[in-house]
Image: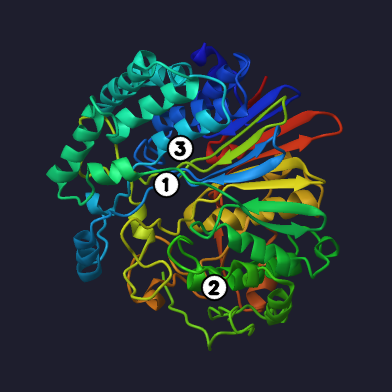
Amino acid sequence: MLERVAQEIGWKAASKTGAVAAGAADAVAAGIEILEQEGNAFDAAVATILALNVTDHGDCSIGGEAPVLIYDAKQREVKSLSGMGRAPLSPQAIEWYMKNGIPNMDIKMAPVPSIVDLVITILQKYGTKSFGEIVQPALRLLDGGPEVWQPLLAKTLRRMVEEEKRTVGSRETRLQAACDRFYGRNAERNDIAEEIEAFYIEQGGFLRRADLAAHKTLIEEPVQADYRGYTVYKCGPWTQGPYLCQALRLVEGFDVKSMGHLSPDYIHLVIEAIKLAMADRDAYYGDPQFVDVPLKELLSDGYTALRRPLIDMAQAAQVARPGDPFAMRALAGAGVFRPGGAGTTTCVTADRWGNLLSATPSANVYRAGGWSRAGVTFGNRLRSLNTTPGHPNCIQPGKRPRITLTPTMVLKGGKPVLAISVSGGDLQDQAALELLLDFIDFGMEPERAIVAPRFATYHHQDSFNPNPNREQTFIRAGSLQVSEQIDPGVREELAKRGHQVTVTEKPVAWPVMMHIDSESGTFYAAGDPAAGRHAAGI
């Protein structure tokens, strides 16, 4: 069935029953299969995420991560799920990182695998089906795959299914048993965790079974901001997501629609707002379990009013300008800059009961060392921490890195309207911001917004560079990358304002987007075809 459905999947879809937009067509087909089996949006999302770990491997993996936003129709609430692994708990490991840095192409850059606990938590709290049912599409993909790690991972997933079946109790209890076998929390069978730990030791890593056993997916309150009657939700400051809310608040003070879509004024405004918001991201964001992130102040009316006049509509900023939300000052200093010269995928799902999910699975898979005997491959997300003493994103035992992964959800009048997921590292929320403005200010449905020309800046710190000298991680001051479809006259005007304009024929980030039209009861889903994204409905 999976192969048949995948052959019919394109880049856009409309449905009144349910829809999925994600990376590869086979992964979308996995979610559609579960929806057709009366699963809800959360069941479908888990099937899609597990399939993405096969079809989009390299961009995501079981050893990777996936922050999630959900809208639970029964509770009428939005929640954030922290599908993000943590740094080793060992103080000696942290001492090593602080002395030697966080390496690249080395297992020491990998956080605790988070995907398994994430999908089990989604199924327990919001889903309806068993792990054994949900994992079938992914198993079929693994069984037919040519890679050496694929049968190993299939064996691991089947051991989890076996544990679920042999356990007596509720659906939630059986799901937990499957999860516990993976993370080494089973009193009798910890074979999977032992195989993962053996790989860490073989490769010279610091993670151990104690790190696996301690891992837990947190269900948190999302960050939110209002924009022209819509409420935009993001995961917390352990992601870069809140800066999109900051940028929206700055943009709201301008008449965007009268500027015209993709006009010089419009592009200039959006980029300058992004620069200001990202400067605050780089200065203040980190795991809120470890640091005091002043989100209330950063999103406040007073702080926004202080920062908005820093946008000069005639001149592009050439320095990074974080503010001071503690003292409520527009600028914290003179600014810093350093002239300079993806591995993620996407998933949104919706169902006829009104549930909605947006996730951004990733891993930047570590290839040099291969894979564990459990078939688990690992990512590099600890490189999104740094070793700068006193910095809010400095590595600590058990700390989550401040990641770029950042799903988006939008409600209006308490009802879900939009779900967006974007891959592309530091470009993710830049593209998400443009998609929101396309929809809210310019009335574009996903199939138009997703293919509209986009633009972005590298006027920010590199989220994957753990260099303790944060100024040296600044990528390119004043930069502005635009899609080649943007009018040459517009580019010339932007250059006159001081933007360092470059033109690209490649997609600026890789998004998927879904609109829920409550009046007609229709889901409109689309994924950028130029970026290899797909969408389907039932």
Residue 122 visible in the shown view:
yes
Q: Which residue is label 3 attached to?
A: 118
Mark 1, Cα crowd under 10 Å, few <14 / some 14-19 / many 20+, is some
Residue 423 picture location, percent across and down:
51, 47
**Residue type, numbered disc 3:** Leu
Mark 2, Cα crowd under 10 Å, few <14 / some 14-19 / many 20+, is many
Q: Which residue is label 2 attached to?
A: 279
Q: Within the image, what quadrant is residue 295 found in?
A: bottom right
Q: Within the image, what quadrant is residue 229 found in?
A: bottom right
- Vertical placement of residue 367 versus 14, above or below: below
Looking at this view, is 165 or 10 the one in front? 165
Q: Residue at x 60, y 51 (%)?
A: 221
Looking at this view, is 457 or 245 the one in front? 245
Whichever of callouts 3 and 2 sits on the residue coming sooner in the sequence is 3
**On-image quarter of the C terminus:** top right
Q: Which residue is label 1 attached to?
A: 343
Q: Nearer the viewer, mark 3 or mark 2?
A: 3
Distance in Å between CA atoms under marks 3 and 2: 30 Å
Left-right relation of 528 to 305: left
- Mark 3 and mark 1 in contact? Answer it, CB < 8 Å: no
Mark 3, Cα crowd under 10 Å, few <14 / some 14-19 / many 20+, is many
- Vertical placement of residue 483 versus 281, above or below: above
**Residue type, numbered disc 2:** Ala
Q: Residue at x 72, y 66 (%)?
A: 249
